[in-house]
Image (tube, rainbow, N blue to C red):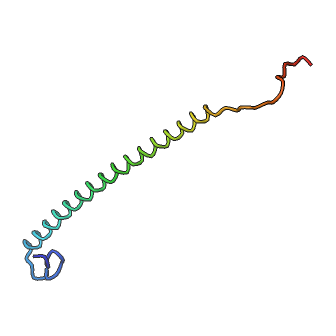
Amino acid sequence: MLRKLLGQGIGSCSINELQEIDNQLERSLKIIRARKERQMLEENARLSQKCGRAALESAQLKEKETSCSRVTMETDLKIGLPDIGWW
């Protein structure tokens, strides 16, 4: 039967046998397509989660950068009398 499914030696098959081979091939293709679709959906979900985590990490880094820039202050050290503006 495997040889016939592979297309070998089908010249001597009856119409009924050829229809059965065709039906078997169709069933096999449906199973393969369903499995492939499931794998692709799982991969898509995994990549979507990964993308979401990357976006979250990026947003957290931007927030951290923003908060760090707010904390950074300019400080000047002057030696001498304060400049009061009398002179």
From what the image shows, is residue 30 above or below residue 20? above
Please provide percent x and percent y for residue 79: 81, 30
**Which residue occupies the foreground of this view, 83 or 20?**
83
Which of the 4 image quadrants contains residue 86?
Answer: top right
Task: Give percent across and percent down for residue 25.
Answer: 17, 67
Residue 60, position in %: x, y?
A: 49, 39
Q: Report the residue at 92% width, 19% height from top.
A: 87
From the viewer's perspective, tell me whether residue 84 is left or right of residue 38.
right
The answer to which of 4 and 54 lies nearer the viewer is: 54
The residue nearer to you, when weighing 51 against 77, is 77
* Residue 41 on image: x %, y %: 30, 52
What residue do we see at 57% from left, 38% from top? 65
Q: Nearer the viewer, residue 22 or 44?
A: 44
Above-or-below relation of 3 to 41: below
- The residue furthest top is 86
Q: On the picture, is 67 further left or further right than 84? A: left
What residue lies at 13% left-to-right and 67% top-to-bottom?
Answer: 24
Q: Residue furthest front?
A: 80
Q: Quadrant of the N terminus?
A: bottom left
